[in-house]
Image (cartoon, coloured by chain):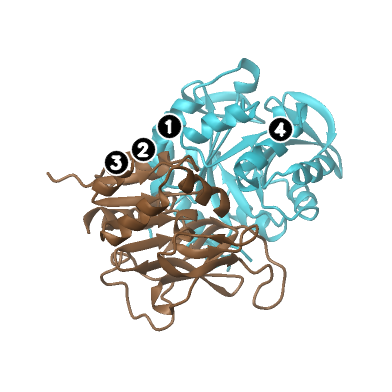
Amino acid sequence: MRNIRLIARLDIKGPNLIKGIHLEGLRVMGSPNEHALRYFLQGADELIYMDCVASLYGRNHLGDIVSAAAKNIFVPMTVGGGIRSVDDATQILRAGADKVAVNTAAVANPQLITEIAQRFGSQCMVLSIEAKQASPDRWEVYTDNGRERTGLDVIEWVKRGVEMGAGEILLTSVDREGTRKGFDIALVMAVTSEISVPVIASGGMGSADDMLTVVQDGGADAVAMADILHYKRAEIGDIRAVAEKAGLGVRYYERA
Amino acid sequence: MNVPEIVVIDYGVGNLLSVQRGLEHCGANVTLTADPEKILAAKRVVLPGVGAFGNAMEALHNLDLVEVIRDVANKKIRLLGICLGMQLLFEESEEFGITVGLGLIPGRVLPIPIRTELGESQKIPHIGWSSLQLPDGLNGWNETLLQDNRPSESVYFVHSFMALPTNSHHRIADCKYGGHSVAAVIGRGHITGCQFHPEKSGEVGLKILRRFCLD
């Protein structure tokens, strides 16, 4: 089994790092790059930047934030929010991103997934999915940061996305996001059992034990962490130590 | 202060910003260019690259850079190939048919095996953090770009093909993928190649870039 990845997720609104609950009720947490640098120095395997209002209001500050981050952060960065075209993806990659995450625009135009994958490679094309539970074993795809229903079934959509060229899935549970109640294990398991590309579980991490459960029971390849890091409830090194102790493969990293 | 001058060859393949920023972070003065004069005047040259081997060689041919890079090697200018840029240093690649490479290091480029050593199918590309290891027969990394590094330190890979040097002493470091040994760093004289991205490998990768700026 490959090493699982510990990813710091930064949700951005305008120039600020924010954190909400169920992707709403956003609270300003401070400067995105101060937090990002802290997570880089703690040993984050990757960073994810998501502009949470970009798809509502058009262009965003993300390019500037990413290009500033590329000066002192040297791990892979995935950037999403408001990417509607191959040109948008090109711009954000030129600013220093390694992968782009697409949600709303991919739902509106699934062909965009293929276009980005063909241009930059599948490893660059992350399909971001916001999922809300509709019934005990069914989840619906939402867009625009958990605001808009699409009527799409998560499992059907994820399979289609992989066929279209998505190289990775960022799977956010809107129900759990910001709640600290743990990941939606059933959702993650339902997705990981259907596809072979890596799945990043996002939304709900309350403790390092939640990370173990979503990897061991849910089959997640990576975990995205926000609240637990922003509120300094744990450092990435603490979480890595828990993973190592449980026998999970993680990146070898010496704490400074 | 003596600021190292480094040229990153800009032949239209891939994102050079991260490489540039990584080198600048290490104190280098970086120029992105495809100008043969500037490349040959540099003290150190980086050959980056992402994408397909054939496209990259075609781009180098179109810019008349193939001979220039061979001259860089002949003039004993320090040369660092990164990711696809490392693979281009070899004689040929099997990616989409046989394509002739720069031929600076004997060997070829092959697909990563689709099965693990135990015969299970494995995910390609190899993406993520893997540990550097000393290849069989090598005792340490003194006098290589890895001299500040230690075995088991992890670096970030994204690749579907791997280099197979003809001479095992050109292997500086390996990583394991599905139980197979994959060349992670290769070296011959003033030439070094990294299959992984040192500019995306945190402090471990920066140590390699810093050493490249110094030597």
The disc at residue A112 is 4
Is A44 situated left or right of A215 in this image? left
The N terminus of chain A sits in image quarter: bottom right
What is the x, y in percent for residue A218?
A: 72, 55
In depth, the one of B89 and B28 nearer the eye is: B89
Q: Is residue B87 left or right of residue B26?
A: right
The answer to whether marks 1 and 4 sit on the same chain is yes
Say above or below: B180 vs A154: below
- x and y percent of residue A46 in the render? 51, 47
Q: How many marks?
A: 4
Measured in 3D between alpha carbons, the distance from the residue under mark 1 to the one under mark 2, in whole angstroms, is 7 Å
Name which residue type carries label 1: Ser
Q: Residue at x 75, y 53 (%)?
A: A192
Residue annotated with mark 3: B30
Q: Nearer the viewer, residue B13 or A235?
A: B13
Do labels 1 and 2 touch, CB within 8 Å? yes
Q: Earlier in the sequence, mark 4 or mark 2?
A: 2
Colour of chain B in the image: brown
